[in-house]
Image (cartoon, helix red, strand yellow):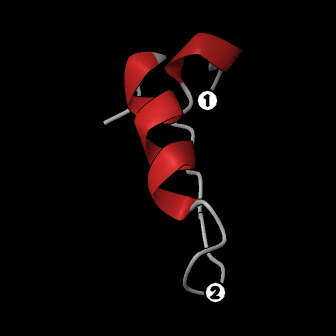
Amino acid sequence: MNQTLAQVPTVIILSGLSGAGKSSALNVLEDLGYF
């Protein structure tokens, strides 16, 4: 199994309290191409 870094999926877990900016962070990640 010889995978390059580009082939390995990236998982980002975004958590936090209400009002901590999760929506803003999610919008930035979406703008960067994460879905």
Relative placement, left or right, of 7 versus 17 is left
Element under disc 2:
loop
Instruction: Please tell me how crowded label 1 is: few (under 14), some (14-19), or many (20+) other residues with Cα within 10 Å.
Output: few
Compared to 1, does 12 lie above or below? Answer: below
Q: Quadrant of the C terminus?
A: top left
Distance between mark 2 and mark 1 Cα atoms: 40 Å
Residue 6 can be seen in this image = yes
Q: Quadrant of the N terminus?
A: top right
The image position of residue 15, as x and y in percent, is 62, 75
Q: Nearer the viewer, mark 2 or mark 1?
A: 2
Residue positioned most to the left: 35
Residue ID at (51%, 46%): 24
Question: How many labels were placed on the picture?
Answer: 2
Residue identified by numbered label 2: 17
Instruction: Please tell me how crowded label 2 is: few (under 14), some (14-19), or many (20+) other residues with Cα within 10 Å.
Output: few
The image position of residue 18, as x and y in percent, is 55, 85
Q: Earlier in the sequence, mark 2 or mark 1?
A: 1
- Amino acid type of disc 2? Leu
- The image quadrant of residue 6 is top right
Residue identified by numbered label 1: 1
- Give 33 or 19, whichever is nearer the viewer: 19
Residue ID at (57%, 39%): 10
Residue positioned most to the front: 19
Compared to 23, does 10 lie above or below? Answer: above
The image position of residue 27, as x and y in percent, is 42, 37
Element under disc 1:
loop
- Amino acid type of disc 1? Met
- The image quadrant of residue 30 is top left
The image position of residue 9, as x and y in percent, is 50, 36
Residue ID at (51%, 19%): 7
- Give 11 or 32, whichever is nearer the viewer: 32
Residue 33 can be seen in this image = no
